[in-house]
Amino acid sequence: MRWAAGSRDQEGSPGGGAAPPRAGVPAARLLPGRTAPPPGLRGRAPSAHVQPLPPASPLSKDGAAAASGSCPPGGSGSCPDPEAFPEAAEIVRKLPRGGPRGSRMADLVEKLRAEGIEKRLVREGTGELPDFRDGTKATFHFRTLRSDEHRAVIDDSRQRGKPMELILGKQFKLPVWEAIVGTMRPGEVAEFLCDVKHVVLYPLVSKSLRNIAAGKDPLEGQRHCCGIAQMQEHSSLGHADLDELQQHPQPLIFHIEMIKVEAPGTYQQDPWAMSDEEKIKAVPLIHEEGNRLYREGRIKEASIKYYDAIACLKNLQMKEQPGSADWIQLDLQITPLLLNYCQYNVKAYFKRGKAHAAVWNAREAQADFAKVLQLQPALGPVVSRELRELQHRLRQKDLEDKARFQGIFSP
């Protein structure tokens, strides 16, 4: 396997091989079915799975021009015929034809390479390269693999039954995904080998995606701070493979299958991708949609809408100081949504009980925990622990209040 600028694995192809190396950069021999390190790792001592080859002949000036995709097929004027340069012919055949389009693709792939990202085309897409401006929605399946000789799979969206939906320009925690999907056309399949600097935050992103797949809050266990601070704060992410990856970062491979690309304004935006202002405006609309679905007897769909509205408000609430006026106002908006959602979800009763306990609403917390026990008696030990913690916090608060008031009324 060779990693090349926009090429697919060409072993045994009539064109005579994979993409040529850049001038001054030695080629690498890979173990069967393995990947080469990204450019950012070249120049270091070879790893256990990469064996250096003797330096290959660099592209000639004309060969490089042909491989860039900027020349129309067959040559024109002073532009050389790419077929005259076997080392570039296969790359040219894999790039979109037609002047600026081919040049744009070659420029994008070369930009990735300069940033420590290598692309290998597995299957060509259809149509022209979309205009990936901010707000564009890319829907794709992905597999995340380790870059060692075993290529172990870390995550696979197909196993979760739902593709990834990424909206560009929304400050996604893994910016490299925006960079790589911006080089793909609908229907295209490609692999991207990414340097460590691009995937340091992947363990946190993976945890959020796993939470979503399990029906949990994607921000569960996180507080409002930067990703690096969160990684330092949490000794464990709750997944052994992610903990190991967090402690020992390494280059990763993303196998991407682009399903569709939608321009801004042509799709309904998911709550998690909204700005704060958009979330505030969307919550009453989502709530009303949930009520409509409930009246129609579509209970499961209604529950999803209520969950989306709660997620919007919880995302806003985590940015506020607990107990502040804004935090309480958001909590008041969350309560009626939880009342609706709790009709179908034991976990929601439990979370609401904990929320009430956090602000010393003892009666409400006890009522919610009692409902949890009624719906799922097996949670008895957990509920008992929460009630003991609530009683402890109430006694502590009572002592603090007495000490405070004693100072007020003393002569």
Image: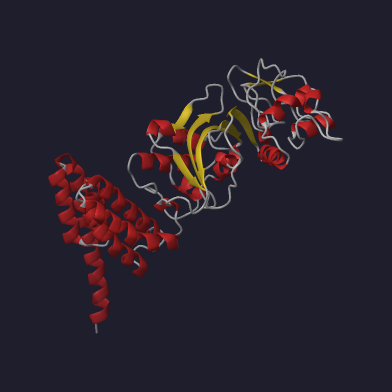
Image coords of residue 150 (percent x, y): 52, 22
Quick check: 346 left or right of 274? left
**Image quadrant in which the C terminus is located:** bottom left
- Residue sitting nearer the eye, 4 or 48: 4
* Residue at (46% x, 43% y) in the render: 165
The extreme top residue here reads 12
Image coords of residue 217 (percent x, y): 35, 47
In the picture shown, does residue 375 fall above or below 390?
A: above
In the picture shown, does residue 347 fall above or below 92?
A: below
Quick check: 68 left or right of 62? left
Quick check: 198 left or right of 84? left
- Residue sitting nearer the eye, 355 or 389: 355
The extreme bottom residue here reads 411
The extreme left residue here reads 374
* Residue at (72% x, 18% y) in the render: 16
Labels in figure, total: 0
Q: Kindly indicate the quadrant of the structure image that contains residue 283.
A: bottom left
In the picture shown, does residue 279 fall above or below 86?
A: below
The extreme right residue here reads 78
Q: Kindly indicate the quadrant of the structure image that contains residue 19.
A: top right
Image coords of residue 209 (percent x, y): 42, 41
* Residue at (80% x, 27% y) in the render: 58
| Residue 142 at least partly seen | yes
**Image quadrant in which the N terminus is located:** top right
Q: How is the image coloured?
A: secondary structure
| Residue 358 at least partly seen | no
Image coords of residue 227 (percent x, y): 50, 49
- Residue sitting nearer the eye, 292 or 360: 292
* Residue at (29% x, 53% y) in the render: 306
